[in-house]
Image (cartoon, grey):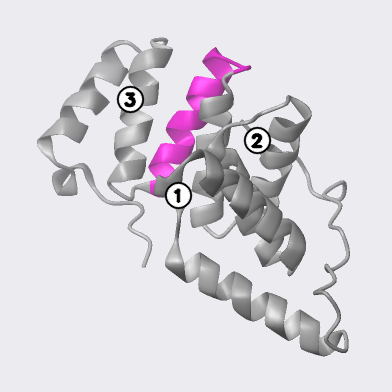
Amino acid sequence: MLLINKTPKDMDETLKNLKQAVALSPDNAALRKVYAKELYNHQYYQEAADEYKAVIRLLPGDENAQLMLARCFWVLERPSAAAVLADELEAQGCTLPAFYLLQAQLALHQKDWQQAKAYYEQATSEDLALKNAAFEQQLREGIQQSGAAMGNTAGGSAEQTVHADVEKPAI
């Protein structure tokens, strides 16, 4: 269950204080990043996405903010928007382990099992904290199913997804 659109009375004191600070200093990108991260950590994903958009407007090349916005979109079940941002990050040469995990999630969503596996292995080889048993199980099941569907070949990957038909999310 996504916990979005909560009222300020539901937020803890830290979030209230950060929100007030951002209101007093809306052009402070570092403060907005802290607030956005706290919103994300407290599962206020839509609000976090809005803050990350504001950070990106202030700091257009901030790959951490772009990645977190893509992660917000992913959690909000907007994989196309997440994929567009992931494509941009890839074009910029992003090498953050969390980026590879997002790419693995997107590839798994597209049933591109081998690409998902490669991205997941890249992510977890660089950051063991990104290991996720549920993801690994989905990946194993997908690879097994695709192997059976392909006549038990070495797992073949699904058709590559091109995101050219998806509009860039408004920032």
Q: Position of residue 8 (x, y in %)?
A: 20, 42
Q: Mark 2: which secondary structure? A: loop
Q: Mark 3: which secondary structure? A: helix
Q: What's the residue at 57%, 74% (across, down)?
A: 138
Is 106 left or right of 42, judged from the image as shown?
right
Between disc 3 and disc 2, whose residue precedes? 3
For this rendering, which residue is in front, 75 or 154?
154
Q: Position of residue 12 (x, y in %)?
A: 14, 41
Relative vertical location of residue 141 with respect to residue 157 in this rendering, above or below:
below
Q: Amino acid at mark 1?
A: Leu
Q: What's the residue at 62%, 44% (across, down)?
A: 100
Is 61 left or right of 48, judged from the image as shown?
right
Asked if residue 69 can be seen in this view, the reply is no
Mark 3 nearby-residue class (10 Å; few <14, some 14–19, many ≥20):
some
Mark 1 nearby-residue class (10 Å; few <14, some 14–19, many ≥20):
some
Q: Which residue is mark 3?
A: 34
Front: mark 1 or 2: 1
Say which quadrant the C terminus sits in: top right
Q: Which residue is mark 1?
A: 130
Q: What's the residue at 32%, 10% (across, down)?
A: 25
How far apart are labels 3 and 2 at the CA level? 21 Å
Q: Position of residue 52 (x, y in %)?
A: 48, 30
Q: What's the residue at 15%, 32% (across, down)?
A: 14
Q: Position of residue 60 (x, y in %)?
A: 62, 17
Q: Does the stretch in magenta take in 107?
A: no
User: Which of the numbered marks, if any, corresponds to residue 170?
Assistant: 2
Q: Mark 1: which secondary structure? A: helix
Q: Amino acid at mark 3?
A: Val
Relative vertical location of residue 23 with respect to residue 76 in this rendering, above or below:
above
Tell me where the magenta segment starts and ends, as one range: 45-61
How far apart are labels 1 and 2 at the CA level? 28 Å
Mark 2 nearby-residue class (10 Å; few <14, some 14–19, many ≥20):
few
